[in-house]
Image (spheres, rainbow, N blue to C red):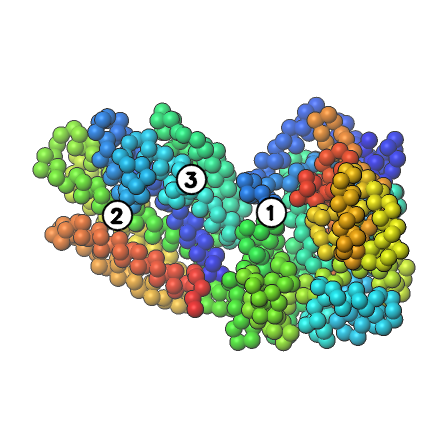
């Protein structure tokens, strides 16, 4: 059972051996007891999320599983090389798309996919973001289908969340089973906040002459990821601000302090592009700061990630990622892209409609596991509903095969049981460096057989170990 | 620090202080109700008057009975002045200023909320009340202890102390006013057992019965009680004590920010006008008038702090 991560069920993957040895030696019930304590720990620190549309349970816990997901040093090196290549390509793609658009001229990506895309911000055209960085933080979603086969599911290039779980999951494992960390060489993840601050500071705007003031911009305490926003600000030693704390003063973005307005240099924003600036984007936004985008374009503030990065993780564009990687790096992609049918193309749409019961269909602009069809587990009615949707608006959808996702063990009352997982490492990009903390967020579909790992749909998390071997 | 953060700290500690003061009042009220069963209505009314809720209570519940007042001030989630709502408000403020708190303070506050949320989820039986009130005080003490033991003594700390003492001064002044006013007619008949019990409740509601007896012997004397609660600089809930702390903390801010604000001046004036006097002159001018003046000055100071340190957006 242990070690099905990409392997056959009767194998024990080498990376899990040390953990298994430890587990076998545990007195009966110890792990179960600790597992129950974990919930109290998370409640106490308040690592909760809000589920939209569920009023009664406005702060909920994400289930935590005590069995870690383990990657060997070799697996990690391979993976991180592939991620680095991909992130470099994404950043180069964004620069190109907002400047000369060579890739469109070369005909490698269709013009229409950019021009008609709401994630494309024409106001970013010709602008060089501070330090040349668009994607300061990327969370690449990866799934595994075989010992050496990793697929990229999504490149979250806007505001990837979940890094606080990576850090707190490790923290609780350290508290519950400290002996594991003495016996097994596990890479640390605790440097992440320091690295984040460093890479954000490295992109200070032209107007910043001193040590940069860094702040995390949150929509507020009612946002589902508020815990993470305050956690990151706290760990980085940065301010946690809301739009109402900010205004434009003398050409700078300034925050209201107890001693008057003081300029902010780097804003790690956790709000979407359209809400950033009611003067430049959605005029109804109450979350943003009027005029912040003009200050940004004038070099008065850094916004991370840059506005307009969403074009790079658009699902319609996803199928072109292999071309994008090759175009900008001159190399073959190291990580696989999931084969994708573009429903916007009639012959591909026909193919999709023909085998809807085998495919996963996703909305091009959807996220969080909402608005998708998982053919093999869907009812006839659900399939027919999607068939109608697809015919009605083919441009709005892509389709992918259901991958034979690897499973990893979770701890249940009946003992260990296999569940499907995905994996999100977090990549930090600065002008002269790309850093990936050896670890990441492993999300697990807690329900037997389920492929959906999103926390909003009953997914859980577990600690992820990269072995220092 | 952000004005919003300073405001959150200030209010977090105001709510904690107010919740605790309400718990003490209930405790004292409960004792009186026990000792003179059947005629406890005026006692509960005085508790409601002290927390400024008599009108709101009467509109919803009519006559003040033990169980209705208990419910209203302890577990009623529709009443923003109930202990459960104030603990929640403190916790919500803490969550909003999470990054200005140490992990210990946040966890103590959050756990306190979780404990009380569970404890105060249904109707509280009278027999359980003493235990419940003790738990409330203990939870508050944990937060205070974590604050004392782990927080940096920086501007954030100054704001949370300001919140604590502005609120405490307000509470003490109200208790004194209501009780004194209510009990005054009986001053002429000092000495009955009932009367002494009444006076003792004043001290009980500020957790100071023992320290009072320590200082003044066993004679409970209205004038000494007033003196104790207003001017005694060692009594941690007296007006003088609170204003020493307020002046100290505003002074640290002035030094730290290199800016003496209007609030600093105002606190000094309040100290001079109200607390730099003898008990005789306070009584000569009328205790009730004195307290009314003090309460409104204290309120003005809170508003001045809000303004001077940019707690809110101004046009």
In the picture, the disc for residue B77 is: 3
Q: Position of residue A107 (x, y in %)?
A: 87, 69
Residue drawn at (16%, 32%) of the image: B195
Residue that badge 2 annotates = B173
Q: Is residue A150 visible?
A: no
Letter of the chain that mark 2 sits on in the rendering: B
Letter of the chain that mark 1 sits on in the rendering: A
Marks 3 & 1, CB-CB < 8 Å contact? no
User: Distance of mark 2 from mark 3, alpha carbons?
Assistant: 27 Å
Outermost residue on the top side: it is A28
Evaluate whether label 2 is on the same chain as label 3: yes
Residue that badge 1 annotates = A52
Marks 2 & 1, CB-CB < 8 Å contact? no
Residue drawn at (26%, 34%) of the image: B63
Q: Secondary structure at mark 1?
A: loop
User: Distance of mark 2 from mark 1, alpha carbons?
Assistant: 45 Å
Q: Position of residue A209 (x, y in %)?
A: 60, 73
Which marked residue is nearer to the observer: mark 2 or mark 1?
Answer: 1
């Amino acid at each position: 059972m242990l070690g099905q991560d990409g392997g056959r069920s009767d194998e024990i993957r080498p990376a899990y051996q040390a953990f298994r040895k430890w587990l076998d030696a545990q007195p009966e019930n110890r792990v179960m007891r600790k597992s129950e304590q974990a919930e109290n720990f998370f409640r106490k620190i308040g690592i909760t999320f809000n589920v939209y549309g569920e009023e009664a349970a406005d702060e909920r816990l994400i289930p935590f599983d005590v069995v870690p997901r383990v990657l060997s040093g070799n697996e990690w090196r391979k993976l991180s090389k592939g991620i680095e290549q991909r992130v470099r390509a994404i950043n180069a793609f964004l620069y190109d798309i907002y400047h000369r658009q060579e890739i469109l001229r070369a005909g490698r990506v269709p013009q229409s996919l950019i021009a008609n895309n709401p994630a494309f911000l024409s106001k970013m055209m010709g602008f060089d973001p501070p330090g040349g960085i668009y994607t300061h933080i990327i969370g690449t979603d990866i799934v595994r289908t075989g010992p050496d086969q990793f697929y990229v599911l999504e490149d979250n290039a806007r505001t990837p969340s979940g890094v606080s779980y990576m850090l707190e999951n490790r923290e609780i494992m350290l508290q519950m089973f400290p002996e594991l960390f003495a016996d097994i060489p596990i890479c640390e993840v605790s440097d992440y906040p320091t690295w984040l601050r460093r890479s954000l500071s490295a992109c200070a705007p032209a107007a910043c002459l001193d040590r940069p003031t860094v702040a995390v911009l949150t929509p507020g305490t009612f946002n589902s990821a508020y815990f993470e926003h305050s956690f990151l600000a706290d760990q980085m030693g940065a301010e946690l601000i809301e739009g109402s704390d900010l205004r434009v003063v003398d050409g700078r973005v300034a925050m209201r302090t107890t001693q008057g307005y003081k300029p902010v240099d780097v804003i790690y924003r956790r709000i979407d592009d359209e809400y950033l600036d009611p003067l430049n984007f959605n005029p109804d936004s109450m979350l943003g700061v009027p005029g912040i985008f003009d200050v940004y374009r004038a070099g008065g503030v850094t916004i991370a990630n840059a506005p307009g990065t969403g074009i790079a993780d658009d699902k319609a564009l996803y199928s072109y990622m292999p071309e994008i990687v090759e175009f900008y790096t001159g190399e073959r992609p190291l990580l696989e892209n999931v084969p994708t049918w573009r429903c916007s193309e009639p012959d591909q749409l026909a193919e999709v409609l023909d085998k809807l019961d085998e495919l996963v269909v996703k909305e091009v602009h959807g996220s969080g596991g909402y608005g998708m069809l998982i053919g093999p587990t869907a009812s006839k009615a659900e399939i027919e509903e999607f068939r109608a949707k697809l015919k009605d608006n083919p441009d709005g959808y892509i389709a992918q095969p259901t991958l034979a996702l690897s499973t990893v063990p979770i701890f249940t009352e009946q003992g260990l049981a296999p569940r499907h997982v995905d994996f999100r490492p977090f990549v930090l990009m600065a002008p002269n460096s790309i850093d990936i903390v050896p670890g990441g967020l492993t999300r697990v579909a807690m329900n037997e057989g389920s492929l959906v790992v999103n926390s909003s749909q009953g997914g859980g998390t577990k600690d992820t170990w990269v072995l220092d071997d | 620090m952000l004005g919003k953060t300073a405001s959150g700290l200030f209010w977090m500690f105001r709510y904690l202080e107010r919740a605790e003061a309400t718990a003490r009042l209930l405790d004292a009220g409960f004792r009186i109700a026990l000792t003179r069963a059947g005629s406890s209505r005026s006692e509960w009314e005085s508790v409601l008057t002290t927390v400024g809720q008599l009108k709101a209570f009467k509109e919803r519940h009519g006559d003040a009975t033990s169980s209705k007042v208990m419910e209203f001030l302890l577990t009623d989630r529709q009443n923003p002045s109930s202990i459960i709502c104030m603990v929640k408000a403190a916790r919500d403020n803490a969550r909003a200023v999470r990054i200005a708190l140490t992990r210990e303070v946040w966890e103590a506050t959050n756990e306190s909320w979780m404990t009380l949320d569970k404890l105060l989820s249904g109707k509280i039986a009278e027999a359980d009340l003493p235990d419940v009130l003790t738990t409330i005080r203990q939870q508050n003490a944990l937060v205070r202890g974590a604050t004392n033991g782990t927080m940096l003594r920086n501007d954030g700390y100054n704001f949370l102390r300001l919140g604590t003492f502005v609120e405490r001064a307000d509470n003490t002044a109200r208790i004194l006013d209501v009780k004194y006013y209510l009990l005054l007619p009986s001053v002429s008949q000092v000495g009955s057992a009932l009367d002494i019990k009444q006076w003792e409740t004043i001290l009980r509601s500020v957790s100071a019965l023992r320290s009072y007896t320590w200082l003044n012997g066993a004679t409970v004397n209205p004038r000494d009680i007033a003196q104790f609660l207003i001017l005694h600089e060692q009594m941690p809930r007296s007006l003088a004590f609170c204003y020493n702390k307020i002046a100290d903390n505003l002074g640290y801010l002035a030094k730290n920010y290199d800016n003496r604000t209007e609030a600093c001046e105002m606190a000094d004036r309040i100290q001079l006008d109200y607390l730099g006097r003898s008990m005789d002159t306070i009584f000569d001018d009328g205790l009730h008038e004195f307290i009314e003046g003090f309460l409104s000055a204290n309120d003005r100071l809170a508003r001045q702090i809000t303004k001077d340190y940019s707690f809110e957006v101004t046009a």
